[in-house]
Amino acid sequence: MIEVNAPVTMSDVARVAGVSTATVSRVVNGHYGVSARTIAQVRSAIEQLGYESSLVATSLRRSRTNVLGLVAHSFQSYTAEVLKGVMKALSRSGFDLIIYANSDLYGSYSEGWEQRHLARLSGTLTDGCIVVTPWGEMRSRAPVVAIDPVRGSTAPSVMADNLAGATTAVEHLLGLGHRRIGFIAGRDSLASAWSREEGYRAALADAGIPVDPTLIGRGDFNPESAVPLARALLQRADRPSAIFAASDGMALKVLEVARELGLAVPTDLSVVGFDNIPESALTEPGLTTVDQSMFQLGYEAARMLKSLVTGEWDEPSQVVLPTSLVIRDSTAAPTGAARQ
Amino acid sequence: MIEVNAPVTMSDVARVAGVSTATVSRVVNGHYGVSARTIAQVRSAIEQLGYESSLVATSLRRSRTNVLGLVAHSFQSYTAEVLKGVMKALSRSGFDLIIYANSDLYGSYSEGWEQRHLARLSGTLTDGCIVVTPWGEMRSRAPVVAIDPVRGSTAPSVMADNLAGATTAVEHLLGLGHRRIGFIAGRDSLASAWSREEGYRAALADAGIPVDPTLIGRGDFNPESAVPLARALLQRADRPSAIFAASDGMALKVLEVARELGLAVPTDLSVVGFDNIPESALTEPGLTTVDQSMFQLGYEAARMLKSLVTGEWDEPSQVVLPTSLVIRDSTAAPTGAARQ
DNA sequence: ACTGCAATCGTTATCGGTTACGTTTCCAGG
DNA sequence: CCTGGAAACGTAACCGATAACGATTGCAGT
């Protein structure tokens, strides 16, 4: 009779098979030095007891576990999309994935917890990690690939071509005739936030329009952070005719604020976001945004991590992925009223 | 100087602090029996070395880890939504979450791997698991909560009110005037598939319409499985004027097949799905479907698991959540041509 | 000064595996 | 018959932590 409630360990198998745990281990791992007859005995005992090796015990002793980790600072649409890409890349690769999420993700709580989790995992459980977090550079014994890294990081990373994407977005607004374009920036520490702001500035400069610092709001990619900034921009007498937000999450909040203030989009105000999260297609009006294929970000990050772990290393360590502008219904030419 | 590349263990801390590892452990876990002076020394050593306890080693020795697990058979929209709910429920609960995903999730490969992963995790790493998989009942030493369990399972589970949801969906079609309504069933082993079919039958029975077995296609919730079934149904001379699919994934494939066959939706064919995954709002036309709040499913499952793990146990073990019909543009009254 | 009990801290077994090393078995070669 | 060496297998150390237990220390009570 099989005991279902008691965990069956290797020594249980060893006892039943009449061998030592070392031999069981050799059979399980297919190592050399076990006679065919013994192998059969051990396998039969494993079958009979329903033995499964403990991931924990194995990883404590071994260096390679064939498990990769993903540590994310939050779990919204962005991360979910990234995750799908990661899973796709790991499909049939022999690597399993462990996603570690802590319970405080909804608040900003402690900045250091990703680092803590990374340390707790990478010492033993995982062969390497993908991190997607706005806080600091991660240090770890095992390889780490960052998605959307912090500014100035030289570690392996994958990111979108934020500069080009932002430039295109602003050029789109300029092409529609907008001249006063507000900007809501992302978290300053991230390379992406920086590049998106650079793109904004570059596009304006190219059009010969001086940057008005008062039209720039300092958000942090957290959607809520955009609310007061949008309110401030839109309640001004000389409000901008368009707002470019550095993320869709923030852009969607701009739409909300606009509605709250009685401004029609795109008639009274044009809004452009960045990311193209699934929700952006669902709003009314649909959000014009820069698609950065978070799926692709995850896919490439996982591919890179795999090659780092296996020691192949055949490509550059900082990958930049193209973006594309997705034009929906939140942008239009400015009306006379909003035009200055 | 801090060594970043060498993993710093408890004995490193002990050496620096001039105490034993047992004392370090006591300090880390806030146990009784350490003098204030020693605590300070140990803390300082921890700080200096950047020590983080290894999750693996800890969980091997301890019974409680304050980590819950999630094992899913695939990682599509459905699971992603569930996950968001789980994370919300775990927010600030003191429980962290580990999601284990294997690399073969894209194929159907081996039916047993969830059980294997569950065994590998629940022996040690996690205090309990949420499983969302269409295969079999899971046995584990630690508590397990199933989302959308297999039929006849008496284990703790969370599921939508599939019977009522399906009934409402079919009644909606009947109300529009449809009389020949096809059905594409889900994986037979799942309680949800069974109930949705029951709802289909019940609604027809209530309307006094005999069930035509040839109008029922046997899918398995995998979107691809719906393709040949939809083709078969729609190429018949007496094709149904409406199709109710047991999942959105399958319903979206029905839409594709209809387009391929030159049938206009909803003019020539009405389609209703079940789940309300995000994609269903994006298709053209938008899919009428039964919302089962996968977010809520995840949320409730996590809540239940928490109380099972902490031994509270204050609620029934099989939770059923309400559903609601979401009417979009894929359903309309049948036209004369399609009406029989 | 001596005993007794807490408080404090180290020693060691243990969790479930892996693996270096040692031992035994077996067979071929001298 | 003896020896050598490879194959097969067991023993025990070890991974990084926890906790039962024992040993030491400090201090109050007599």
Image (tube, coloured by chain):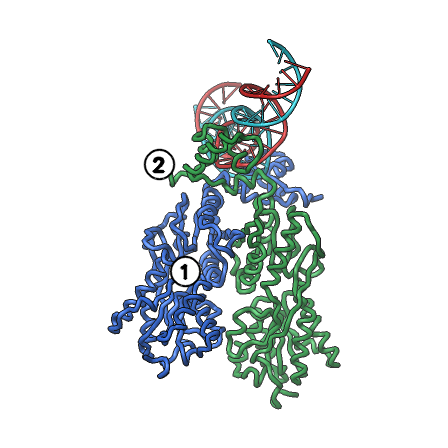
Chain colours: A green, B blue, C red, D cyan
Q: Mark 2 points at which residue?
A: A1
Mark 2, secondary structure of its residue: loop
Front position in the image: A81 or A201: A81
* Quarter the N terminus of chain B occupies: top right
Q: Quadrant of residue B202?
A: bottom left
Please give left or right for residue A25 compared with residue B203 in the image: right
Residue B220 in sight: yes
Chain hosting mark 1 = B
Q: Which residue is drawn at 61% across and 51% down?
A: A129
Residue B100: percent from left, percent from top: 50, 51
Which residue is pictured at 62% across the width and 86% down the height?
A334
| Mark carried by residue A331 | none
Q: Distance between the residues labelled 1 and 2?
A: 33 Å
Q: Which of C8 and C29 is in front in this view?
A: C29
Q: Which of A95 and B297 is in front in this view?
A: A95
Labels 1 & 2 near each other (Cβ < 8 A): no
Q: Which image quadrant is residue A156 in?
A: bottom right
Residue at image location 64% in from the left, 77% down from the top: A182
Looking at the picture, which amino acid does disc 2 mark?
A: Met
